[in-house]
Amino acid sequence: MSTDRSGRTESDGDVAASHADGDPLVRVRNLEKYFWENDSLVDRLLGEEPVAVRAVDGVSFDIYEGETLGLVGESGCGKSTTGETLLRLQDPTDGRVEFEGRNVYDLAGDALTDFRTNAQVVFQDPFSSLDPRMTIGDVVQQPLDVHGVGTAAERRERVRDLLERVGLSVDQLDRYPHEFSGGQRQRIAIARALALEPDFLVLDEPTSALDVSVQAQVLNLLDDLQAEFNLTYLLISHDLSVIRHVCDRVAVMYLGEIVEIGPVDEIFEEPKHPYTEALLESVPRASTAERDRDRETLTGDVPSPRDPPSGCRFRTRCPKVIPPEDLEIEQDDYRAIMDVRQRIESRDVTLESVGGEAFAFEDGSIPERDVDDFVAALKGRLLDRELPARHDRLLEEALARLASSDWDGAAEVLRDHYESVCERRHPDLGDEDHPAACHLYDDSVYASDESDADRSRTDRST
């Protein structure tokens, strides 16, 4: 929980009240950061089309003075890129970041220098974020030298105070980073970040490279420093136990987007988004009473940010993907059919190896007499369950198209009967206290989806 300068811990109600009473210290709106492939001069001369890797794709959130906002998600979801782009360490593709009411991307000259002074970062890896050729005294003093803070004597005294504050001895001023442990190096990095007395810190996985015992020391240090200096944190982490211990609110990120955001207790005790539920299910439980609990594991791989899925980006792995309203089917059966459909659409099936050497493709197809056996063998490979008769027939109809290598036709059969609102419409995050970007919480989803479905069928028939 956040604390004021006197060290008093704020309750969740106090934090919520402070949000209602004032503007956020940091306001992020529709932030985008794309990295481009096939975009060199040679690529353009060869007529190659640039491909966008959508690392951050329309992220919005607020951070209030004195609070800690956690940013969580799987590796590669865009958490670190969000933090770096927010601080202008990366140039944004689009969007707006306001710090104390001013657009960070419009700042220049003295105004930009002021922002650099007030917003600092602690990087993930303490082994590479410190210059090995500089003593730790010089490392911590460098920001003071760059910004011309005080006299040489005052800067040196400031360095001594900071090192003592983070639990290091002033006798170690002239030692080099390689002479310290990982936890000590992270303390040095924190001292450097505090040198200019910032208001806001981005903490990018500050404990992930440390032993568990050292992690607790660093987290307690960050908590103490927040209380002493009234700091505001954006804590980026994949460690949910760290997030729960430190943060006031949590934003959950998936494939470049925020899918849920809310108070830390609500996120952990009453998660809304299926992805958040899956993340929490992945946390090991210490209690033996929970060893036999049912767990909803995610299927499939994380899609590429080069070509993210349409609609809800989590739909390709979601255990609660919404079937068409008029389709009577169990959720597990529907998820299994959607998995088969995705493999067909991505052509992630080696047809030539189905049934060993039993089926010989000639000119892209197998003889008519072998189609039924081919379908049975392929269904056994792709599906691990028995489907109700109606759905079994539809799946066999689709798989029969693959006997003649008609990938598009097979996908079309399944799409016509099983297309979900989750792939037709992108869910909105909303602006309430605990929003989730999921159609499960959209009461009007079926009503507005009927016209989308009709329009989709019309487009495919023309």
Image (cartoon, rainbow, N blue to C red):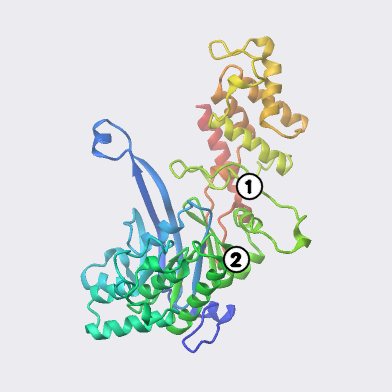
Pick the front one: 83 or 329? 83
Residue at x 49% of width, y 77% of height: 221
Query: Neighbour class for label 1 at 10 Å: few (<14), some, many (≥20)?
Result: some
Secondary structure found at label 1: loop
Q: Are marks 1 and 2 in contact (CB under 8 Å)?
A: no
Query: Neighbour class for label 2 at 10 Å: few (<14), some, many (≥20)?
Result: few
Dividing the picture into quadrants, the one containing residue 171 is bottom left
Secondary structure found at label 2: helix
Check residue 241 in the rendering and tell me which mark sits there, or answer none: 2
Measure how far apart labels 1 and 2 are at the Cα level: 20 Å
Question: In the rendered view, would you say 142 is above or below 291?
Answer: below
**x and y percent of residue 274 in the render?**
63, 53
Residue at x 43% of width, y 52% of height: 57
Question: In the rendered view, would you say 196 is above or below 366?
Answer: below
**x and y percent of residue 252 in the render?**
54, 59
Foreground tag (1 vs 2):
2
Dividing the picture into quadrants, the one containing residue 415 is top right
Amino acid bearing label 2: Ser
Check residue 298 in the rendering and tell me which mark sits there, or answer none: 1
Question: In the rendered view, would you say 334 is above or below 223?
Answer: above
Left or right: residue 241 versus residue 136 is: right
Residue at x 54% of width, y 42% of height: 424
Label whose residue precedes the other's in the sequence (1 or 2): 2
